[in-house]
Each structure stands twice: as structure tokens, then as C-alpha cells.
Image (cartoon, rainbow, N blue to C red):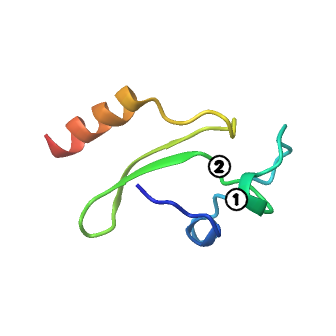
Amino acid sequence: MLSDRELEATDQFGLRNQGIHSGLPVGGAKALPVPTSILADADGRVLWIDQSENYQQRSDPEVVRAALNTHFA
């Protein structure tokens, strides 16, 4: 889990939300990240990614759990 209040990692991964959203970002942020769940191995290789076009919708925990089971069970 990563908290990225300053959007540093968000910008490095190119995940800054460029679309119009219905609410102002919380805490004075100038933008919101695209909700993204990334599963990477110990070498940093991306094994799985789930992204939402709706900034208010996050990955379903069961979908993330299934990805973890697939790649690390």
C-alpha cells in the first residue's frame, strides 16, 4: 500500500487524473491520481494491474485477493 499525498509516485507512473472530476481533491492537492492497484514482484516487475476510469472507484478487495492468489499462491 502506498500513500502518495504529493503525487510523486503518481507522476512517475503517469497516473495523474487528467480528466474532469466531480469534486475537489482533499488536502489541498491540485489533482487526483487515477485509482490503480499494481502488483509487483520483489524485482519490481509488474505482474498485474487494475485501473479505474472513475476516480471514486477503487479495486474490489476480492479482485485484488484473486490476483495475489494467482501470482503468489
Dividing the picture into quadrants, the one containing residue 45 is bottom left
Q: Give the residue type at disc 2.
A: Val
- Identify the residue at image location x=26%, y=60%: 41
Check disc 1 and give the amino acid type: Arg
Q: Which residue carries the number 2 mark?
A: 34
Q: Classify 68 as above or below 6.
A: above
Disc nearer the start of the sequence (2/1): 1
For the residue labelled by badge 1, is the local secondary structure a helix, a strand or a loop?
loop
Quadrant occupied by the C terminus: top left
Residue density around tag 1, few if under 14, some if 14–19, many if 20 or more, within 10 Å: some
On the rendered structure, is 40 left or right of 4? left
Per the model, the C-alpha gap separating discs 2 and 1 is: 6 Å
Q: Do callouts 2 and 1 mark residues in contact (Cβ within 8 Å)? A: yes
Question: Which residue in the structure is indicated by mark 1?
Answer: 16
- Residue 43 locus on image (x, y percent): 26, 70
Q: Is residue 16 above or below residue 67?
A: below
Above or below, 56 relative to 10: above
Extreme residue toward the front, this view: 27
Label of residue 6 in the image: none
Quarter of the view holding residue 13 = bottom right
53 vs 27, nearest the viewer = 27
User: Who is closer to the viewer here, 29 or 61?
Assistant: 29
Q: What x and y, as percent, mark residue 5?
A: 61, 64
For this view, does 15 lie left or right of residue 63? Answer: right
